Amino acid sequence: MPVSENGTAQEVAAARVLVGSASDFREGDRKLVQVAGRTVGVFRVEGRFYAYENTCLHQGGPVCEGRYFPKMTAVVTGDGRVLGEKYDESEPHLVCPWHGWEFDLRTGEFCGDRSKKLRSYTVETEGDEVYVA
Amino acid sequence: MSELYDRGKIQIENLLRNARAQADQRGFDRFPIVDVDSHHYEDRRWDEIIPYIEDDGIRDWARAMTERSGKAAATTITTAQVGNQEVSGRILRAGRNQLADLRDLSAEQRKHDDVARMLWAMDMMGIDYTIMFPTPMLHLSLHPAAEVEVALARAYTRWLTEELLPQDDRIRTLAYLPFNDPEASLRMIEEFGDTPGVVGFMVTSIRYRPVHANEYAPVYAALQERGLPLAFHAAYNWHEQSMTQLNKFISAHALGFSFCNIIHMTNMIVNGIPERFPGLKLAWVESGLAWIPFLMQRLDNEYLMRTSEAPLLKRLPSDYMRDMYFSTQPMERTAPTGMMRESFEMMNAENTLLYSSDYPHWDFDVPSVIYDLPFLTDRARHKILGGNACELFGLPTDKRAPASAAEAGLAPMVGEAVPVASTLS
Ligand code: FES
């Protein structure tokens, strides 16, 4: 089983699966496809494609069907007072609809513990065609 | 980036499809699964329930509030809590917003919508029997007028047992006791104790009348005599004086759901209710499990220094607790496996735990949460997931959920089981 740069084992599908044409994907669009018996969510974020298994690390919920929310941050003054909360839109999260576990949409990392990641898949584009492998 | 967030929401076709896959992968068709705590949203049915209110004044009050406020009537006649269950819209609960949009379950099954939704969720999770609780009524215990608690409890119970439960015997209830009125509670037991579908009674735990008060002696005696369990269903009360210091839902919820049952359990034990009513079957619902070893240690430690303050006790407080029943959800699963194993042993888990989903509430547990615990024997698994509840509530042990996704009307799902995280470490 090949291991990606970050050391996480990646699923290898028996064959590539055609997801659709790249031009069908606008920013933020996603598609669910079947890859070797598993449901995989394919996302387009800032022009790049990401694919994750639709199984949450918590109780196995359909994480890829969840909503996107920006990372939440607290506004803290230099002297330690909290002034409120602000979204950081530069870090989009994919939120599992079952109980709210949040994952970094661009890495699949679990935001509650960055050492845990969603099972990810390699996305290949050939011409206008997008494949999950 | 805002373009991205504009497309952040899609229609989910079947929110519980993965639960059905888990049931298939684990073979949940091999043994009965009982869910001792699921919910419906009775506040959406007040127009059906109101005609069952017997008191003319309270019925007209309720009707007038419905006409004025529509669906909000439930919170104008009962009591409301400040809430943020869905973490500002992140969690999508099936009971609220899924599937019913796509097809009309109740028309398909010719059943009340609440029955149809419940059966659908049970079929998806592989659950054979469920004990269904209301939702906003869990706060009715805080109503300042005891007669309103009595009137609504009676109306709800009559509606439930006359209209809903006769439609399918997979759904049972622990009937609501209006505990702010002990005499009315006793009358409820006498009236509904033998009603089909009623497997016991429940008290909602956010309340202020001490449960060891002598006025409850006839209530406990009546339950003991009939062999009917009494469940204390936890809730949170953000208006509770100590809780008003907490600014976040996470805080009020995490503490509140254990806090209320810790208070009642402490009163029950220290005042010797298990010695006075040794046949009374008590179940503690929806406080999680971590509070049990905590309270066992706190009470045992102090009891040994102060036995004369609890003269009715013949055993350690924890010994009495090990004779009671506890629902499993929301099961805290972040401790090291060894610590969880010890906790399970300490609470006699194999014989006292009752699986509960709490579905469709936000912190629900699928049956795999129990099934995948690495330290349970098969026997313990089966007992916690169903056997203990079948025995306690006198339920049949036959399989009622579909045996597979295909039987449940879904395309077959393949792929091997991915264990749900038993711990984070
Ligand atoms: S299954 Fe995803 S948050 Fe629980």
Image (tube, coloured by chain):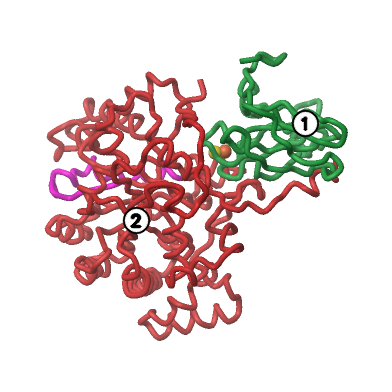
Residue at image x 42%, y 59%? B119
Q: Is residue A105 above or below residue B39?
A: above
Q: Nearer the viewer, residue A8 or B288?
A: A8
Q: How far apart, in angstroms, are the residues tagged by discs 2 and 1?
A: 46 Å
Q: Quadrant of residue B133?
A: bottom left
In this rendering, position of residue B376 left or right of residue B75: left
Count of labels in the image:
2
Per the rendered image, the range of residues in magenta is B257-283
Q: Which mark is residue B220?
A: none
Q: Is residue B380 above or below residue B225?
A: above
Which chain is home to disc 1? A
Q: Nearer the viewer, mark 2 or mark 1?
A: 2
Bin the neighbour count of mark 2 within 10 Å (Cα to Cα): few under 14, some 14-19, many 20 and up: many
Q: Position of residue A82 (x, y in %)?
A: 74, 34
Q: Colour of chain B?
A: red
Residue type of the residue flagged with mark 1? Val
Q: Which chain is green?
A: A
Which residue was labeled with disc 1? A76
Which residue was labeled with disc 2? B131
Q: Quadrant of residue A3?
A: top right
